[in-house]
Image (cartoon, coloured by chain):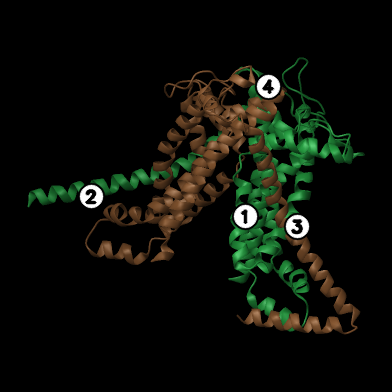
Amino acid sequence: MNQAKLEKRAMLNQESFLSSKNDNIKSEWIKGRIFLLICIVSILFGILSLAALLIYVFWDALGWLNWQFITSTPSRFASKAGIFPMLMGSGFIIMLVALFSLPLGVGTAVYLEEYAPKNLFKKFIEINISNLAGVPSIVYGLLGLGLFVSFLDLTHGTILVGALTLTLRILPVVIVTSQEAIKAVPVSHRRASIGLGTTKWQMIRSVVLPESVPGIMTGMILALAVAMGETAPLIMIGAATSIFTAPRNIHSSFSSLPLQIFAWSDFPGEGFRHGVTPAAIVVLLVILMIMNGAAIYIRHRFSRDKN
Amino acid sequence: MSNNLTKRGFEFISENAIKTFFLLCAIVSVVTTIGIVLVLLIETTNFFREVSLKEFFLGFRWNPTIKPTSFGVWPLLSGTLYFTFITALIALPVGLLSAVYLSEYSGRKIRSIIKPALEILAGIPTVVYGYFALVYITPLLRNLLPGIKTFNILSASIVVAIMIIPTVASISEDAIRAVPQSFRLAGLSLGITKFQVTASIILPASLSGILSSFILGLSRAIGETMAVTIAGGNLARLVNPLKPAEALLEPMQTMTAAMVEIGLSDITGNSTAYKSLFAVGFTLFLMTLTLNMVSQFIKNRYREKYK
C-alpha cells in the first residue's frame, strides 16, 4: 500500500521533471525504461523459445501420431515404426518406482518430522538429502551399475535394476515434498489426537498422514514425472535404447520412451527426423503434461487456503 | 485385565517396530550417499591401478575404447568447462533479469501466469531438449552462422541455458524478495528512480543469494548429459585457448557425454574403459558436490543476515 503510493508519487515527480529541461533526470528515466524492457525480453526469451520449439515438434508429429504408431514395434521403416514396447517399459518402470519410493520417501519424511530428535543426526540426514538432490542423474546411473549390476550381480538392463536406480534418483524429491506436506499439518490436530489418548503411531496414521496425503501425492507425481523423463541413468545401467518386445516381468530387458527418442535422434532419414521422433516426443510430453496437470489439480483441490 | 495388558504390550512393541521402520527408511538415504562414494572410490582406485595418475590428469588425448587407448581427461574437462561457460553466459543474466522482473516489476496477475510458465522450462526432459537443439536450433543458427557444424556446442548450450533459467530465476527471486521493504521505501523517498533502487540497493543487498543461484546453475550445467550428447557431437578434443570463439560452432565432448558413449559401447566389467567411467564420474561428482556445497553455504549466510 505504502509502496504503491510512494511509487506513484515518484512517477508523478519524474513526469513533471521530464517536462522540465533537466537532462540528467530525463536520461535516468530512459535508463529505467530500457532496463525494464531488457527484463521483459529476458523473461520472455525462455518461454517464447520453448513455445516455438513445441509448435515445431507438434507440427512435425502431425500425421505420424496415430493408433498404429502407439501399438507398433520399432522398425527400420519410418512408416511402420511404433513405440508400443517402450510405452510398456516406461509404464512398468514408473509403477515399480512408485511402489519403491512411496514407502521409503514418506517413511523418511515421517521419521524426520515426527520421530527424529532435533539434533546433529537429523541435521546430518537433511544436509545429506539436499546434497543427494544435487547429484547429476548420470552419477546415479553409475551407482546402479556399480551397486546393483556389479556388486549384487543382478542382470544389467532389467526392469528391476532400472526401477531401483530411478528410485534412488527421485528419493530426495519425494522426501522433501513429503516433509513439507507433513509440516503443514497443524500442531493443534496432533495435540487433539494425543489428548484423546492415542499412541504416536495412531496419531500419525489417523491424523498426520490422512491430512498430508494431497501434498504427498502432488510431490510423488512430480517426482515420477522426473523419473519418466530420465535417460542417462538408464543408459548407464545397460538398458536397451530400442527393443521389440514389451517387458513381461521385473527380470525382462526393457527400453523406455526417452531412450527410444535418444536412439531415433541418430536416424538420418527425413521420416524419422521430422516424423517418427517428434511423434514419440509428443507422446512423452503429453504423458508428462497429464501427470503435471494431475499434480496441480490435487494441489488446488485440496489446498488448505480454502478452509 | 490380562487381555488388556497383552494389548498394551502389543501396542508397545508395534510402536517401536514402526519407529524402527521409519528410521531404516531414513538410513536408506545415508546408505545411498555412502554407496555413491564407495562405488566411485573403489572403481576409480581400480582404474588408477591400470592407468597412471599422470596420464589421466595431464594427458591430452581421450580414446577409451579403440586401441591404442589413451585416458587423458583434459579434452573432456575442457569440453565441460567450455560448455558450462557458454551456457552460463546465457542462463545467468537471463535468469537474474527474469527474477528482477518477477519480484520488482510484475503485477500479481502477470506473475501468476509467468511463474508457472517459467517452471515448465525445467520440466521438459533433457533428451527432448537435445533433439530440439539438433533438429530445430542448429538449422536456424545456420542461417546466421553458415560455418556451423551439424553437431556443435552452441545449440546445446542454448537449450541447456533455457532449461536452467527457472533454477537461477527462482532462487534469485527468493533472495531479492528477502530484501526488506524498508530498503526500497528508503531509496524511493530519496527521490531516485526505481531502476536506481534496483541496481544500487536491491541487487547489492541480495548479492549472496544471487551468487548462490549462479553457482547452482553452473553445477546443473556441468552435470547435464543428454542434450550435450545428442546435439554436441561426440568428439573429445581440447579447446584451442587462443581461438575460443571458433570452438563454439564445432563438435565437442563433455565428461557426461563421454560417459554415455562408453555406456553405450559393448564393454565388459573388467576393461579399463569400464573403470574409466567411474574415474570420470568421480571427477564430475566432486565438481558438482563442491559447487552445491558452496552454493548452500552462501545461501545460509544471507538467510542469517535479514532474519
Q: Are marks 4 and 3 on the same chain?
A: no
Residue position for label 3: A41
Q: Residues within 10 Å of mark 1 (few under 14, many from 20)?
A: some
Q: Residues within 10 Å of mark 4 (few under 14, many from 20)?
A: many
Q: Which chain is green?
A: B
Q: Amino acid at mark 1?
A: Gln
Q: Are marks 1 and 2 in contact (CB under 8 Å)?
A: no
Q: Amino acid at mark 4?
A: Ala
Q: Can you say whether A219 is above or below B266 in the image? A: below
Q: Residues within 10 Å of mark 3 (few under 14, many from 20)?
A: some
Residue position for label 4: B273
Chain letter of the residue beneath label 4 in the structure image: B
Q: Amino acid at mark 2?
A: Phe
Chain letter of the residue beneath label 1 in the structure image: B
Separation of residues labelled 3 and 2 (CA atoms): 62 Å
Q: Does dot 4 land on a helix, a strand or a loop? A: helix
Snapshot quadrant of residue A53: top right
Q: Can you say whether A186 is above or below A4 in the image? A: above
Q: Which chain is brown?
A: A
Depth-wise, is mark 3 or mark 2 nearer the camera? 3
Residue position for label 2: B12
Separation of residues labelled 3 and 1 (CA atoms): 30 Å
Q: Does dot 2 land on a helix, a strand or a loop? A: helix
Q: In the rendered view, does B252 fall on the left or right side of A139?
A: right
Q: Can you say whether A277 is above or below B241 in the image? A: above
**Which residue is at the front of the view, A240 or B148?**
B148
Separation of residues labelled 4 and 2 (CA atoms): 54 Å
Q: Does dot 3 land on a helix, a strand or a loop? A: helix
